[in-house]
Image (tube, rainbow, N blue to C red):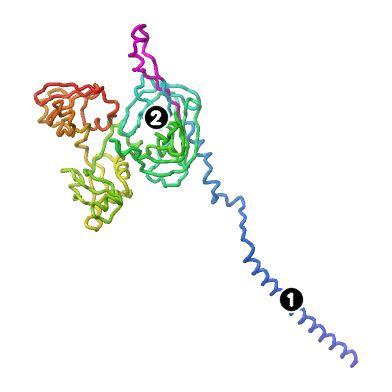
Amino acid sequence: MKSILKIFLISIICCIATIVTYDFFKKSSYDNNNKNSLENRKLIPNYVSFNSDSRSNSDSEKTDFTIAAEKTINSVVHIKNTSNYREDSDSWLYRLYGQSTPKRIGNGSGVIVSPDGYIITNDHVIKDASEIEITTNDNKTYIANLVGTDPYTDIAILKINSNKSLNYIPFGDSESLKIGEWVLALGNPFNLNSTVTAGIVSAKSRDLNQMDRKNQSFIQTDAAVNQGNSGGALINTKGELIGINTAISSITGGFVGYSFAVPSNLARKVFEDILEFGNVQKGLLGVSGNALNQNLAKKLNINETEGFYVNNVEPNLGAEKAGIKTKDIITKIDFVKINKFSDMSGYLSTKRPGDVINVEYIRDKKKFNTKVVLKKITRTIFLGMELRNTEKSDISIIKNNTAVKVTNVENSRLNRMGIDNGYYILKINEIEIKDISQIERIDVESLNSILFMSPNGEKERIIFE
C-alpha cells in the first residue's frame, strides 16, 4: 500500500513539472514570435486591399463620365450658317456675268437649353447668317430663327420648332466651379454627331485680351476643343451646363492645350435678358480704376497687391451712394474674391440694374463692408467719344429720331471732322441707336458707318473704309 502511494505522489509531481516546463517554453516561444513580428512590421509595407463595396470612395468612379455624357449628348446640335459672301459678289466676274451672290457656309455647335427648342450658341457662329440650319444628334434638321445676339459676350439665342419635347441640358452654377474639377466638352463639329472630350478646370476669370472693350471672364480648361466645337457645351460630372465653349489658344489653329468657355451664369443671364427685354441688361457699380499688382502697389505706395484700386467714382450711382471713395481697394463682391479686373467684371456681368451686392473694401488699412444697389449704365466710351442716353431736353433737337448724345470727344480724327460735344449718334451700320447699351455690343472691327446729327439738326454720315 505504501509503495502504491509513493508511486502516485511521484506521478503527480512529474505531471506538475511537465506542465510548468511546457508553459515556460510556450511563453518564451510566443514572446520571441511576437518580437519578430513587430520587427518585421517595420520592414514590410502595409498593403490594404479594397473590395467592391469600397468603389464609391475610389477615383475610378469620380472620373466615370458615362452617366453625364449619356444625359447630355443628345442636347448638343450642329449649326450650319449660310451667308452671302460679299467680297466675291463685288468682283468684276460676278458683275459681268450677272451671277447670283455666292454663298459661304460656316459650321459650329449649339446647346438646347429648354424642351421647347431654345438653343444657345456663339454669336460668331451665326454672324451674318442668311439661313441657320440645325441638325440634332438623331440626324433631324430644322431651320432656326434668330431670337437675339450679344456680341459683347459672344452669345446668340436661336429657336427651333419641334412637335415633341426636346432633350436639353439644365443650367449649373459656374461660380461654384473649382480649379482642378473634372469637366466635359461636348460639340457637334462638321455634322459628325456629338463628340465628348474630358479635362479639368485650369483657371477661372480668364481675360484673353485686356486691351479690347470686352470685359471677358472665361473658364479655362484643358478639354480638347477644335474648330466646329464653338458654341458647344461645357458640363460638370453631374451633367449640368457650366459653360459655352467659345475659343481656343492656338498657333496652328488646332487644339494645343487650352480652351475657353463663357460661364453658364453669364450665358443664362444673357439668355433670360434677351427673352424678357430684347437686349442685355447691365448693372453698373459706378467705379473705374485698375487691378492691383506688385508694380502698381509700389507706385501707389500701398501694401496691397491684390484687389481693385478705385481711381474714380461716378456721381449719383450705387458706389457713391454706398460711401465708396477714390483710393479704396475693393477686395470682395459677395462671395467672389477680387484678385484681378476680370474677377469683378465677370461677376458683375451676371447682375442686373436694381440688384444689391455686398462690397468688401479696404480704406486706410481697415476693412469695410457696404451694400451697393447696381444702376442702369449711364455712359459708355466708343471710338474715343463719351456717350450718354438722351434726356427730355434733347427731344426738341432730335425730334422723332432715336439717338444717344456725345458728351465728350477725345478722338482727334473725329475732332478734325467737326464732331464735338453736343452731337448725336442716330445710326451705326444703318442700325438705329436707341440706348447706349447697344453701343457696348458693337464690334469695332465691323464698323462701316456712323450717322451723326449736329446740335442745329444737320445730319452727317462718316464712312469707315
Residue 122 falls in image quadrant: top left
Answer whether residue 219 is visible to the viewer in this image.
yes
| Number of residues whose C-alpha sits closer than 10 Å to that of mark 2, classed few (under 14), some (14–19) or many (20 or more) | many
Give the magenta-colored segment's residue range: 76-104
Residue 172, compared with residue 420, is above or below; it is below
Q: Amino acid at mark 2?
A: Ile
- Residue 380 image position (x, y, % from top left): 21, 35
Residue under label 2: 119
Give how far across and how far down residue 432 sits, in percent: 22, 24
For the C terminus, give its image quadrant.
top left
**Mark sitting earlier along the chain (2/1):** 1
Question: Label 1, on which residue?
Answer: 26
Q: Residue at x 22, y 21 (%)?
A: 463
Kind of element beneath mark 2: strand
Is 271 or 251 nearer to us in this picture? 251
Quarter of the N terminus within the rendering: bottom right
Percent position (x, y) of residue 384?
A: 20, 33
